[in-house]
Amino acid sequence: MHIFDEPQKPMNVVIKTNSASKMNVEKAPPTNQMEAETTL
């Protein structure tokens, strides 16, 4: 398990998911809402 890889990947994923979740929440599909809640 790479210690340096773990912090970088989650941060990038969180940023992408946050921007994507806002766009998806506006569209409001139930699956995207579930994913948005899990990211939070």
Image (spheres, grey):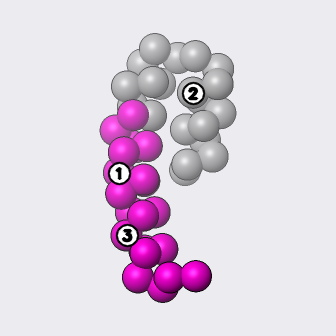
Q: How many labels does the image show?
A: 3
Residue type beneath disc 3? Gln
In the figure, 14 relative to 37: above or below? Answer: below
Query: Viewed as shown, does residue 14 lie left or right of 31?
Result: left
Disc 2 residue crowd, few under 14, some 14–19, many 20+, Cα 10 Å: some
Q: Please give the name of the residue rendered at 36% of the width and 57% of the height, measured from the top-left corner.
A: 12
Q: Does the magenta stretch include residue 5?
A: yes
For the residue pair 8 and 17, the one nearer the viewer reads as 8
Q: Please give the name of the residue rendered at 44% of the width and 34% of the height, measured from the top-left corner.
A: 21
Residue 17, horizontal then vertical, whole percent:
43, 43
Residue 2, horizontal then vertical, whole percent:
50, 82
In the figure, 2 relative to 10: above or below? Answer: below
Residue 38, horizontal then vertical, whole percent:
63, 46
Disc 1 residue crowd, few under 14, some 14–19, many 20+, Cα 10 Å: few
Marks 1 and 3 close (CB-CB < 8 Å): no
Q: Name the residue under label 3.
A: 8
Disc on res. 24: none
Disc on res. 15: 1
Give the mark nearest the N terminus, 3 or 2. Answer: 3
Judged from this view, the residue extending furthest toward the front is 1
Give the mark nearest the N terminus, 1 or 3. Answer: 3
User: Please, what secondary structure does the residue beneath circle 3 have?
Assistant: helix
Number of the front mark, 3 or 2? 3
Q: Does the magenta stretch include residue 30?
A: no
Q: Please give the name of the residue rendered at 41% of the width and 82% of the height, measured from the top-left corner.
A: 4
User: Please, what secondary structure does the residue beneath circle 1 have?
Assistant: helix
Disc on res. 32: 2
Disc 3 residue crowd, few under 14, some 14–19, many 20+, Cα 10 Å: few
User: Please, what secondary structure does the residue beneath circle 2 have?
Assistant: helix
Quadrant where the N terminus lies?
Answer: bottom right
**Highlighted range, magenta:** 1-20
